[in-house]
Image: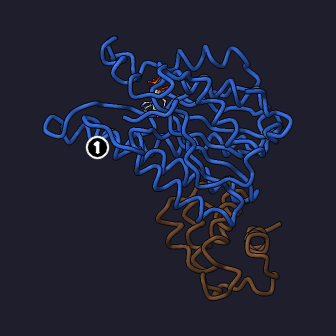
Chain colours: A blue, B brown
């Protein structure tokens, strides 16, 4: 996919990306930088974020916090708020809720703590980020939110009910908030990856991977860059008439 | 600008109303300009004007101009 920078309108503005230390997150950061944005790169792994920011120190602002910690999220947004008038950063016009955890377990073997943890990280934290980001964007009457959900949440997958529920909750919020925030000029979309080769899926052995890929029409795993391209499109003005949409990046996957 | 003037300006910018309408007893949802969308823009405007970040409970409580002043006072903004 060619860069959409000519139509992206991200130059002079900033975007917050959670899970920026992960594989898909890093690809999203690179994509948004190419489209002209300054990126607040959030995660817990300080070393990885520091390394990432060294690739473009003027345009990558690392933010180290646990997204499941409500107070820490507020503090991070306070930092973002304090930089809104800095011309080197620019106003926040984008949020990518990309951080996520996946704990595969059957119904009988799912501890409620593990279920709550996935709901906290994959849904509640993303929700709090949307609340706070929308407030910053409302003044400008423009913004785009992209939530990274999953085909597992869209279609269901045996042995992944808690993860599926947490992602489906985020899809529901995406569709509802797209309608609610339309009048404030904020678009809300989601990207639903299928099987992408990252640390989230590295525990799959060859046999398990083959089984997943056999249910993928393209018969191959996707790349973080392909997910990032979809995020870049939904973040850009090339998708300015699109909101409440769940964009699949899955090679036609049937989990 | 005094804090009262800044507050009035924030209400005018967010709701698209005149300064004469910004009275202490003006309440949320009693004029068409102050609906839920405008409320969000108002919160955004107040946070930017007074450099604060409001708690969700305070946003829910902010049902009038008088209440806005009372809540902002908790964030060391005096009127
Ligand atoms: N890989 C796939 O096949 C696939 C498929 C569908 C959807 N997805 C979704 O894509 C997104 C990115 O996943 P990925 O494959 O890139 O996985 P990954 O490499 O494991 O990255 C996960 C990211 O989430 C962050 N994170 C997790 N818990 C956090 C917390 N409590 N606080 C702050 N950050 C936290 C991690 O940050 P730290 O390491 O710094 O803590 C990391 O940056 C996730 O939402 C995932 O559900 C992935």
Nearer to the camera, A251 or A179: A251
Q: Would you say A130 lies left or right of A84 here?
A: left
Is residue B50 something that shows in the picture?
Answer: no
What residue do we see at 45% from left, 26% from top? A195
The N terminus of chain A is located in which quarter?
Answer: top right
- A136 up-or-down from A236: above or below: below
Q: Which residue is mark 1?
A: A116
Q: Position of residue A240 (x, y in %)?
A: 75, 51
Residue A35, image quadrant: top right
Nearer to the camera, A213 or B70: A213
Nearer to the camera, B56 or A240: A240
At label 1, counting other C-alpha atoms closer than 10 Å, the crowd grade (few under 14, some 14-19, many 20 or more) is: some
Number of numbered callouts drawn:
1
What residue do we see at 31% from left, 18% from top? A208
Label 1: chain?
Answer: A
Q: Position of residue A235 (x, y in %)?
A: 69, 42
The C terminus of chain A is located in which quarter?
Answer: top left
**Residue at disc 1, secondary structure:** helix
């Amino acid at each position: 996919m060619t860069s959409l920078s000519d139509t992206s309108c991200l130059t002079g503005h900033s975007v917050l990306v959670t899970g920026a230390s992960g594989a898909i997150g890093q690809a999203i950061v690179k994509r948004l930088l190419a489209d002209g944005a300054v990126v607040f790169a959030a995660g817990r792994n300080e070393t990885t974020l520091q390394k990432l920011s060294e690739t473009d120190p003027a345009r990558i602002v690392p933010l180290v916090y646990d997204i499941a910690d409500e107070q820490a999220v507020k503090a991070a947004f306070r930092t973002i708020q304090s930089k809104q008038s800095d011309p080197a950063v620019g106003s926040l016009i984008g949020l990518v809720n990309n951080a996520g955890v996946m704990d595969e377990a059957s119904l009988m073997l799912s501890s409620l703590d593990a279920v709550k943890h996935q709901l906290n990280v994959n849904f509640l934290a993303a929700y709090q980020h949307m609340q706070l980001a929308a407030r910053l964007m409302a003044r400008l009457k423009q913004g785009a939110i992209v939530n990274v959900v999953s085909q597992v949440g869209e279609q269901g997958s045996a042995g992944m009910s808690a993860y599926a529920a947490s992602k489906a909750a985020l899809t529901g919020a995406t569709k509802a908030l797209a309608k609610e925030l339309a009048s404030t000029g904020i678009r809300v979309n989601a990207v639903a990856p299928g099987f992408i080769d990252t640390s989230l899926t590295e525990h799959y052995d060859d046999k398990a991977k083959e089984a997943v890929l056999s249910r993928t029409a393209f018969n191959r795993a996707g790349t973080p860059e392909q997910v990032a391209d979809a995020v870049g499109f939904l973040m850009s003005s090339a998708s300015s008439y699109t909101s409440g949409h769940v964009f699949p990046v899955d090679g036609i996957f049937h989990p | 600008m005094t804090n009262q003037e800044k507050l009035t300006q924030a209400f005018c910018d967010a709701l698209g109303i005149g300064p004469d309408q910004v009275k202490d007893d003006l309440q949320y949802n009693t004029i068409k300009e102050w609906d839920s969308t405008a409320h969000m823009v108002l919160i955004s405007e107040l946070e930017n004007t007074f450099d604060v970040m409001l708690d969700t409970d305070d946003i829910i409580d902010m049902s009038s101009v008088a209440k806005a002043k009372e809540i902002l006072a908790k964030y060391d903004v005096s009127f």
